[in-house]
């Protein structure tokens, strides 16, 4: 994360200076993109720090959702500072025409070439981190902070490529429309990325359920317990990157005394904690089906009606 922040600050400065010297809307759009990425890296560093705080009386389930909140702010930053400014640059280029110089454009292309190399290195480091955490299919992109860095670096590489293409075509043809189109494409790319990141952060903030695989493991474990007659309800909610709340309502077989019920509940919680390590908080609503309830069940009523 610190590497990404340092790279973005350096690249943003170089792009801004180069864009002003060359009068290039595409290069200025990329400068805005890098500025947005720099602010977002600051947000994500805050998320990493604040989400590690231990639970307290005001937040008994911890601060794990801080990551999701700051990821949402990062998405808003990409949209406003990157996407909207890029659209403005494209419109301004079409209205105002071209005021570029050849020497300025050569300098701008050099800046973009260095930026492409630097952003590529940052993207490779982020992808390596994803691989270390299990790859794209094994949970490497569950971390919203790391997912945002990968999205930032990937769009940066693509955005720089678009800017280089627009500037090169402008130099070759003298048509500012190519650069305006590059600015619009960069803006559309950033708006799309912001939408995807914002939607994921929103889902996690409003109470997204645990992964389907984890829910299936918990349900199968509950149903496998000999003392459980049925699993009436199972609720899960992510409370952080690697933590989740689990609440289940189960009916026990009749004939268990209170001591036995307590032992069963403790044993089930331990089994769930071992099977699903992210289940940090486990709550069981344990009830025992009485003989009267069994007699009043639909099956028993049907048998009596048939008799």
Image (cartoon, rainbow, N blue to C red):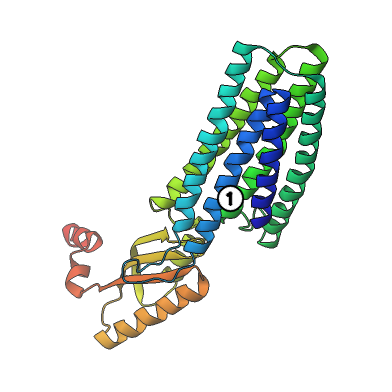
Query: In the rendering, at what x and y percent does residue 126 appear?
Result: 69, 53
Between residues 285 and 220, which one lies in front from this camera angle?
285
* Residue at the image position 30 percent from the left and 76 percent from the top: 253
Dot 1 alpha-carbon crowd within 10 angstroms: few under 14, some 14 to 19, many 20 or more: many
Quick check: 305 above or below 93? below
Q: Secondary structure at mark 1?
A: helix
* Residue at the image position 59 percent from the left and 17 percent from the top: 92
Query: In the rendering, at what x and y percent does residue 100 appear?
Result: 74, 18
Between residues 72 and 227, which one lies in front from this camera angle?
72
Residue 20 position by quadrant: top right
**Side of 133 where 104 appears, left or right:** right
Q: The N terminus is located in which quarter?
A: bottom right
Quick one: which residue is furthest to the bottom in this view?
259
Q: Which residue is mark 1?
A: 41
Quick check: 191 above or below 292? above
Query: In the rendering, at what x and y percent does residue 246 appear?
Result: 39, 65
* Residue at the image position 69 percent from the left and 33 percent from the top: 17
Between residues 215 and 14, which one lies in front from this camera angle?
14
Residue 192 position by quadrant: top right
Answer yes or no: is residue 257 visible: no
Query: In the rendering, at what x and y percent does residue 103 appear?
Result: 82, 24
Q: The C terminus is located in which quarter?
A: bottom left
* Residue at the image position 18 percent from the left and 64 percent from the top: 296
């Amino acid at each position: 994360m610190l590497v990404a922040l340092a790279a973005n600050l350096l690249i943003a400065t170089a792009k801004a200076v180069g864009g002003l010297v060359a009068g290039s809307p595409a290069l200025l759009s990329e400068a805005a993109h890098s500025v947005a990425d720099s602010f977002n890296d600051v947000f994500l560093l805050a998320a990493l720090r604040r989400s590690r705080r231990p639970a307290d009386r005001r937040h008994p389930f911890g601060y794990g959702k801080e990551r999701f909140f700051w990821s949402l702010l990062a998405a808003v930053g990409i949209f406003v500072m990157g996407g909207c400014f890029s659209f403005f640059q494209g419109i301004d280029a079409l209205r105002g025409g071209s005021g570029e110089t050849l020497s300025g454009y050569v300098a701008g292309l050099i800046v973009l070439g260095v930026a492409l190399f630097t952003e590529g290195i940052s993207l490779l480091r982020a992808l390596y981190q994803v691989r270390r955490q299990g790859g794209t299919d094994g949970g490497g992109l569950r971390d919203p902070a790391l997912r945002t860095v990968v999205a930032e670096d990937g769009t940066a590489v693509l955005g720089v490529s678009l800017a280089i293409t627009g500037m090169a075509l402008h130099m070759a043809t003298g048509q500012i429309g190519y650069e305006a189109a590059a600015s619009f494409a960069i803006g559309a790319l950033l708006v799309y990325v912001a939408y995807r990141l914002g939607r994921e952060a929103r889902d996690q903030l409003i109470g997204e359920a645990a992964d389907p695989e984890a829910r299936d493991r918990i349900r199968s474990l509950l149903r496998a317990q000999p003392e459980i007659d049925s699993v009436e309800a199972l609720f899960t909610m992510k409370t952080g990157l690697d933590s989740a709340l689990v609440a289940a309502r189960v009916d026990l077989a009749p004939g268990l005394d209170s001591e036995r019920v307590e032992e069963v509940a403790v044993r089930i919680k331990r089994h769930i904690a071992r099977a699903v390590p992210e289940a940090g908080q486990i709550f069981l609503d344990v009830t025992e089906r009485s003989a009267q309830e069994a007699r009043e069940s639909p099956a028993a009523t049907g048998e009596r009606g048939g008799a």
